[in-house]
Image: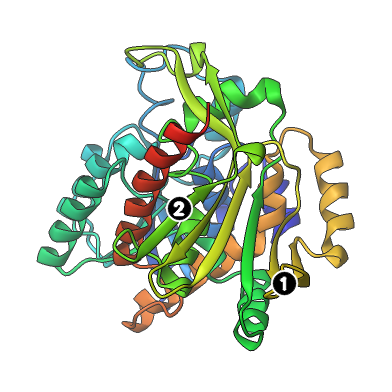
Amino acid sequence: VIASACGISAIDKSKSIFRKDNKTADVLVVGMGLPKKGMGWYHLTQLLEMPQANVIGVVEPFFLNSDLCKSPPQEFTDFVEASSSVPFYKSIDELEEFPNDTLCLIAGRTSDNPKFFEQCVKKGAKVIFLEKPGAPSVAKLEEMKKLADSKGVKVYLGYNKNVTPYVQKALKLSNKTKGSHVLFRHNNSYKVEDLPECFARNSEGMLKNMAIHELALLVSFFDVTTETIESFVIDRKNSEKLTIDPGKWLPSAKSAIFQDFSRIKFTVTTKSKKSVSVMADRCGGNISYAAVLGPDGAEVGKFEFPDPADIEKVNAQVKADRDMMPYFFVQSDDYWTLKTLVIDSMINGKVAAGVATIDVGIEALKLAEYGTAECMKAVH
C-alpha cells in the first residue's frame, strides 16, 4: 500500500471509474489538495488501489477554480493531466444527483466542509467520511448531524488513531495496570520554516487539527467530555505559542497574522478521577507513542508509532521522497483500514465497527474548543 500510493504520479486506468461489479461502492473525493501534501490526494491514491472502491470523480474547489487560484502549482496540473481516466470538477454543483449509493470522502479545508457536506447530502450521498475535525465549530457539526439524520445519511470521521495498533496495545496494558496513567504523544516532522504553510492549511488550530485525534481517543476510551472534566492542567514548559504570518498561503484571511501552538501538553482529570495526558508537537519528528505510567509515575510500557520494526523502512521512504509528507508513510496502514471499514460497511449495509461517528466528533470538537481557550490563556 505505502510504496504504490506514495510513488503514484498518475492514476492507473484499471482502477478508475470504468471498473464495475456488484461488490463496489461509488466514491466521490471532495478536496484533493496538492500531490504529496494534501490528505485528499493521499486518500485518492489509496482508493484507486482498493478493489471495493469505485472512484466516480474528484472535486477540487480551490486549484481548479480560476477565481480563487490564478496559477495552480505545476505538480497539481501535471497530476490532473496524467489522470485523465477520472473526472475532475471544480464544484460539487457540476455533478448530477448520484445514481447509485455513494460515499463522499470530504477532505477540504475545515471551514469549507459544512458547505461541501450539505452539497453532498443534496446530491444523494448515503455515507460521508469527513476528515477531522469535520467543521470549524461544534454548532456547525451539530447542524451537519441534524441534516444527516433527517436524510438517513451515515457519517464517520477520519480519526485513524481509534483503530491503530499502538493505541490498542497501550489501552490493553492500562486496563491491566491499577492506577495507571496514559500519555499520548503525537509528533509531526515539520521544519520550523514550514510552519506558516502548516498553520495556514490547518487554520482551525492545533487542538482542532493535529491534537483532535487524541481528543477523540479521550472521548472514546476515557469518558472525557467537557461535562466530565474536573481539571485541565497545561504543562507550560512543554508548550509553545507562535505568532505567524501565513502570507501567500492564506490570502483570504482578514488579518494575515494569527497565533497557534507549535507544541502543547496538558493533563485532563475527570470527575470520576480518570487521568490522561496529551502532547502534540508539530516539529517533534516521525515517531509518536503512547506511554503507560504506573501509580508512582514510572513508565510501565511504551508503544511507538511506527514501531522499531517499521521505522527503518519509513526513514528510507522519507529519504527517497523528500517532497512527501512523512506522516503519509507512517500512517498509511491506518488510513487504509479506516476506509476499508467504512466502504465495506456501506456495501454490507452495516455500521463501521470501531470507526468514530459524528457523535464522537462532536464531543471531541467540544473538547478542542474548551482546550484551545484554556491553552491560549495559559501559554504566553
Which residue occupies the foreground of this view, 290 or 373? 373
**Residue 328: % across, % down:** 66, 49
Instruction: Determine which quarter of the picture holds residue 238.
Output: top right
Disc 1 residue type (three-letter): Asp
Residue 36 to residue 97: above or below: above
Q: Which mark is residue 296?
A: 1
Residue 238 to residue 146: above or below: above
Residue at x 29% of width, y 62% of height = 227
Which residue occupies the foreground of this view, 275 or 341? 275
For the image, the number of numbered tags is 2
Q: Are marks 2 and 1 in contact (CB under 8 Å)?
A: no
Residue 123 seen:
no
Mark nearest the camera among 2 and 1 is 1
Instruction: Determine which quarter of the picture holds residue 109.
Output: top left
**Residue 258: % across, % down:** 44, 19
Sequence-first disc among 2 and 1 = 2
**Residue 257: % across, % down:** 45, 13
Q: Which mark is residue 28?
A: none
Which residue occupies the foreground of this view, 9 or 134? 134
Q: Say which element carries label 2.
A: strand
Instruction: Determine which quarter of the picture holds residue 195.
Output: top right
Residue furthest bottom in the image: 176
User: Does residue 369 appear to the left or right of 32 in the view shown?
Assistant: left
Residue furthest front in the image: 296
Query: What residue is shown with label 2?
Result: 232
Which residue occupies the foreground of this view, 208 or 270? 270
Q: Quadrant of the N terminus?
A: bottom right
Which colour style is shown? rainbow
Disc 2 residue type (three-letter): Phe
User: Does residue 201 appear to the left or right of 237 in the view shown?
Assistant: left
Residue at x 38% of width, y 57% of height = 364
